[in-house]
Amino acid sequence: MAAWSEDDAGNADAARVLRQRALRVWGQQDGLPAALRRLDLLRRTEAWAAAAEAAAWLDRQALDSVGAAILRLQHAKIAARDSARHSLAGAAAQPPVAPERVGWVRRLLRR
């Protein structure tokens, strides 16, 4: 994808324009994998409201474990207004429980 090349060259604005173009060309494709790709493009183009709406729609879908991990990562990055690139390994590293609740969950499990 040309946007990745622009990212590598340090041309964030050009990469954003290419991602916006991809969103227009792809339109609304069917299927959950396409919806996850579209969500990533929305976040990477800093379309925060549209990204949050797309993530909320995906919350109501039956995602497999990989899709759910990607969605958790996207939620965290949207909330942080983070438009940077992230890997699938980063998605897998996202905890299934919000970090601020980990201590509470651990205390509950010790009972």
Image (cartoon, rainbow, N blue to C red):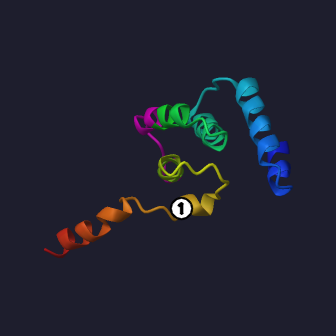
65 in the magenta segment? yes
Q: Name the foreground residue: 9 vs 59.
A: 9
Q: Which residues are magenta?
A: 56-69
The image quadrant that residue 90 belongs to is: bottom right
The three-letter code of the residue at mark 1 reads Ala
Residue positioned 48% across, 38% down in the render: 55
Spot the residue most to the left.
111
Q: Where does the N terminus fall, quadrant-wise?
A: top right
Residue positioned 52% across, 53% down in the render: 73
Q: Which element is circle 1 on?
A: helix
Q: Name the foreground residue: 26 vs 16.
A: 16
The reply, left or right, for residue 52 in relation to residue 10 is left
Q: Where does the C terminus fall, quadrant-wise?
A: bottom left
Residue 103, position as x, y percentages in the image: 27, 71
- What is the crowding at mark 1: few (fewer than 14 residues within 10 Å), some, or many (at least 20)? some
The reply, left or right, for residue 50 in relation to residue 24 is left
3 in the magenta segment? no
Spot the residue most to the bottom.
110
Q: Which residue is mark 1?
A: 92
Residue 39, position as x, y percentages in the image: 59, 38
Q: Main secondary structure of the magenta part?
A: helix
Residue positioned 40% across, 59% down in the render: 96
Residue 95, position as x, y percentages in the image: 43, 63
Count the marks: how many? 1
Residue 56, position as x, y percentages in the image: 43, 35
The image quadrant that residue 19 belongs to is: top right
